[in-house]
Amino acid sequence: MIHCTPFLLFDGNCAEAMTFYQQCLGGELTLTKLADTPMKDQLPVEKHNRIINAQLKSGAIDISATDWMASPSLEPKPGNTVSLFLIGSSYQELKSVFDKLAEGADPDKRTFQELHSVPFGSYGQFTDKYGVGWVFKADKAI
């Protein structure tokens, strides 16, 4: 079953911000550094201490986050640091929703990534025709 959570983008202070939110909201916080994943070889060494995935769960609250990895091709600015994060169990489960929401999306390669296989499953992202950012993740690859 697909579920949705807010997805916050930080510029190097994701661990600090998410720790603060945990202190305010309680719950369990999971922080994963890029250096601790198979994806580290795909990005420069200076990004390896950044958080690739953070998740705070506290009762009905579920917030996901990451540090900005796209610089310098795309810089964080107000309006592009919050997205909706759709999480499913498989590529097949997300693909039809991805395709429908992507209709009319900006095909700019800096912000549009087709749903594809990555070491942790499937991943894709884009900004829709209304300017809303969407991020997709499935536990299983294509």
Image (cartoon, rainbow, N blue to C red):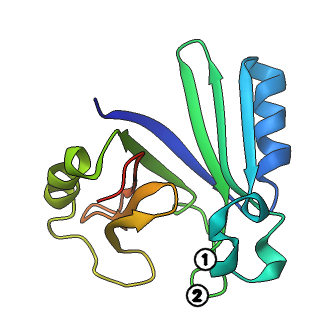
Note whether 112 is above or below 15 in the view shown: below
Classify residue 43 as left or right of residue 23: left
Note whether 123 is above or below 64 in the view shown: below
Q: Secondary structure at mark 2?
A: loop
Asked whether the residues under the numbered discs 2 and 1 touch, taking CB atoms below 8 Å apart as contact, a structural biologist would say yes
Q: Secondary structure at mark 1?
A: loop
Q: Position of residue 25 (x, y in %)?
A: 73, 19
* Corner quadrant of residue 107: bottom left
Q: At x 76% / y 17%, what residue is drawn?
A: 26
Q: Amino acid at mark 1?
A: Ala
Note whether 108 is above or below 28 in the view shown: below
- Estimate the spatial distance between the alpha carbons at disc 2 and disc 1, rounded to whole Å: 6 Å
Q: Position of residue 4 (x, y in %)?
A: 39, 35
Numbered marks: total: 2
* Corner quadrant of residue 47: bottom right
Crowd around label 1: few <14 · some 14–19 · many ≥20 (10 Å): some
Q: Position of residue 15 (x, y in %)?
A: 81, 47
Q: At x 78% / y 27%, what residue is drawn?
A: 22
Residue at the disc numbered 2: 73
In the foreground, 31 or 120: 120
Rendered-image quadrant of the N terminus: top left
Q: Position of residue 88 (x, y in %)?
A: 34, 40
Q: Amino acid at mark 2?
A: Ser
Disc assigned to residue 70: 1
